[in-house]
Amino acid sequence: IVTVSPTPDVSSDQLSYAICSGSATNIVLSNPNGVTGTTYSWTASVTTGVVSGSSSGSGGVISQTLSSVAGGTVEYTITPIANGCSGTPIVREVTVDPIPDLGVSPAAETICNLGTTNITLSNPNGAGDGYYWTVVMSGLSGAVNEGSAAIPVAGPIGQMLTLDDAAVGGTATYTIYSVNSVTGCESLSKEVIVTVSPTPDVSSDQLSYAICSGSATNIVLSNPNGVTGTTYSLSLIHI
């Protein structure tokens, strides 16, 4: 008696794949013709760029964390095996897209009430096409979230901030990302805290003064709203 074993085949949930650098593949393998005992083995080769993390293996899911600074591709050649018989291999390609990096300047900023932020954004490795940010405010208004991973915006972040109470400072904490809207890859976030200083006021002990020629003025100045560190400067107007 000669037993002729059936030939297994292999398929996957997609024909091609794209992931961001540092992410894991998730190539799910199946056996459409249902040959009992089918297993899968694969070999891996980097076909473009420099990609790390790929290797030959076996199993029902190819899950490997692939990394590439500038992007690249890996081809997996997958072979089904059952009862000592190998089926026709298939090839699946994984594109590894680079992660945009993010530069922000300054790392922190202090402005006056009703001042405008000036946070410059950059993407040194050129892998992004824009930015998005979220912001948390404390004691002020005027800061808004802008952009998204799908629809990024350009920098800089220039927003006028207004204290709820001019005598009490506040903060706006921006969490910023660089993103590529085509690949969906985004940078690690960076945080910039903008401190808005309170606006001091000034008063004097009298509204007007009269002295005799040759006498000294004695205009006593004060800061009614109590802003710490308030000093005073004056200019002279002769009338």
Image: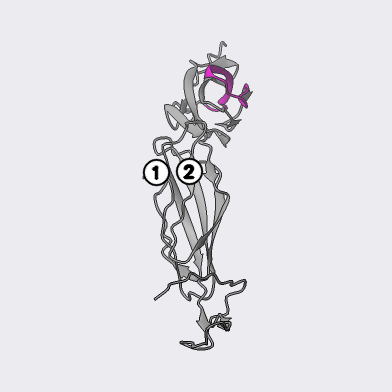
Dividing the picture into quadrants, the one containing residue 40 is: top right
The residue indicated by pointer 2 is: 121
Residue, far left: 151
Foreground of the two, 173 or 14: 173
Mark 1 is surrounded, within 10 Å at the Cα level, by few (under 14), some (14 to 19) or many (20 or more) other residues, namely some
**Residue kind at label 1, given as amino acid type:** Ala
Dividing the picture into quadrants, the one containing residue 54 is: top right
Residue 175 horizontal/vertical position (percent)? 52, 53
**Residue 9 in view of the camera:** no
**Residue kind at label 2, given as amino acid type:** Leu
Between discs 2 and 1, the one toward the N terminus? 2
Label tally = 2
Q: Which residue is drawn at 51% across and 71% down?
A: 234
Residue 85 in the image: above or below residue 125: above
The residue indicated by pointer 1 is: 154
Q: Which residue is drawn at 58% across and 79% down?
A: 226
Foreground of the two, 233 or 57: 233
Q: Which residue is drawn at 44% across and 51% down?
A: 157
Residue 66 horizontal/vertical position (percent)? 58, 30
Q: Separation of disc 2 and disc 1 at Cα?
A: 8 Å
Foreground of the two, 215 or 202: 215
Mark 2 is surrounded, within 10 Å at the Cα level, by few (under 14), some (14 to 19) or many (20 or more) other residues, namely many
Residue 121 in the image: above or below residue 173: above
Q: Which residue is drawn at 62% across and 71% down?
A: 229
Quarter in which the N terminus is drawn: top right
Residue 204 horizontal/vertical position (percent)? 52, 84
Circles 2 and 1: CB distance less than 8 Å? Answer: yes
- Which stretch appears magenta? 36-56
Mark 1 secondary-structure assignment: loop
Residue 205 in the image: above or below residue 57: below
